[in-house]
Image: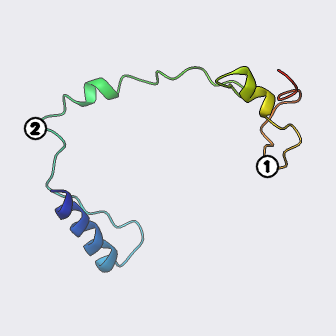
Amino acid sequence: MQRDVVRHALDLIRDATVPGTVTELDYRWAPDDAWKDGVMRGDSRQERIDTPQYQCAEDASLADPECPTCVWLAPGVGEGA
């Protein structure tokens, strides 16, 4: 099945004439949609906050507040937190 899906994808790359072309294949992940019950229960992630979270204090101390690409760091982060 995986080879067939890849073959169809490559054929679509070759044959599609307009952007956004979609081709439906006759494959299913499971005989029914019961698998969706376990994965579509809403967002169970923790609340997002403005300051980065680190696995340990050492990681926080290594964060460089002067790093030009780390614009997401809040003031004071990485200063021995």
Q: Is residue 17 above or below residue 28?
A: below
Q: Circle 1 is placed at which residue position? A: 69
Residue 81 marker? none
Residue in the picture at 22% in, 58% down: 24
Mark 1 or 2, which is nearer the eye? Answer: 1
- Position of residue 71 relative to residue 5, above or below, is above
| Left or right of 33 on screen, residue 38 | right
The furthest residue to the front: 58
- Secondary structure category for the residue under label 2: loop
Q: Give whichever of 77, 47 is nearer the camera.
A: 77
Q: Amino acid at mark 1?
A: Thr
Q: Secondary structure at mark 1?
A: loop
- From the image, which quarter does the C terminus lie in? top right
Tell me where residue 37 sits by quadrant.
top left
Q: Foreground: 60 or 21?
A: 60
Q: Nearer the viewer, residue 50 or 23?
A: 50
Q: Position of residue 13 (x, y in %)?
A: 34, 74
Chain-order first, disc 1 or disc 2 = 2
Q: Is residue 66 left or right of residue 12?
A: right
Label 2 belongs to which residue?
31
Residue 34 in view of the camera = yes
| Percent x, y of residue 2 | 20, 57
Name the residue: 15% across, 56% down.
1
Q: Residue at x 15, y 38 (%)?
A: 30
Residue type at tag 2: Pro
Question: Where is residue 17 drawn, in percent x and y?
Answer: 35, 79
- Looking at the image, can residue 50 be seen? no
